[in-house]
Image: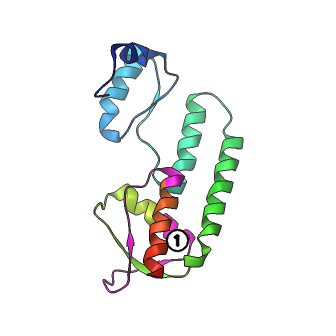
Amino acid sequence: MHQLSLEAVTALGTAQLNTLRDPSLVPVGDHLRQRFGTPYIPSFPTGFSDTLAFIGSVAAACSVDAKQALDTEQAIQAEILADFADIGDSQGVFCGPVTDHESSRAAREAADALHIRVSGCKEACQLPVHPVVGTTGVRRMLHRWRRAIRA
């Protein structure tokens, strides 16, 4: 919201749903909901399960059926896991510059889905964990893991 034009500011009230960049913007979401009646979702999804919940929340807020979108998303997630089956059953330790709870949870979920054993052993293969947004973010993270495991 830092560099919005006046036209963009006046259009804020026309949205059917607002998605906030992160939970710290909830006061902004509350204000827009109070002022314009626009519901909001407090942040972007982190990881696979959050993406499914996000789709459900968007559908509910917009009064639409989420089944087709959820089925499509689940198929995409299954395809991603199949694409990375070659790194399944590996062992590693999470590392990275950011250790926020959401990214760690998304990393753990992906590791569990691929049967990757995560240990605290510093000598184990280092699996980089970065902020993960949605399914695409998980795919990027898994590419990094593949490079680390094969190095």
Q: Quadrant of the N terminus?
A: top left
Q: Is residue 132 magenta?
A: yes
In the displayed orientation, state which residue is furthest to the bottom. Answer: 123
Q: Is residue 110 magenta?
A: yes
Left of 39 or right of it: where is 78?
right
Left of 129 or right of it: where is 16?
right
Q: Judge whether 70 appears above or below 39 on screen.
A: below
Its colouring scheme is rainbow
Residue at image x 39%, y 13%?
7
Q: Judge whether 74 appears above or below 126 on screen.
A: above
**Mark 1 neighbour class, 10 Å CA radius: few under 14, some 14 to 19, many 20 or more:** some
Q: How many marks?
A: 1
Q: Which residue is mark 1?
A: 112
Residue at image x 63%, y 28%?
63
Residue at image x 37%, y 28%?
29
**Magenta extent:** 108-136
Q: Judge whether 102 appears above or below 65 on screen.
A: below
Q: Position of residue 44 (x, y in %)?
A: 44, 43
The image quarter containing residue 131 is bottom left
Most foreground residue, 60 or 130? 130
Left of 52 or right of it: where is 105?
left
Q: Quadrant of the C terminus?
A: bottom left
Identify which amino acid the numbered label 1 is placed on. Asp
Q: Position of residue 141 (x, y in %)?
A: 46, 63
The image quarter containing residue 115 is bottom right
Q: Judge whether 101 appears above or below 62 on screen.
A: below
Q: Position of residue 95 (x, y in %)?
A: 33, 71
Left of 60 or right of it: where is 145?
left
Residue at image x 54%, y 46%?
53
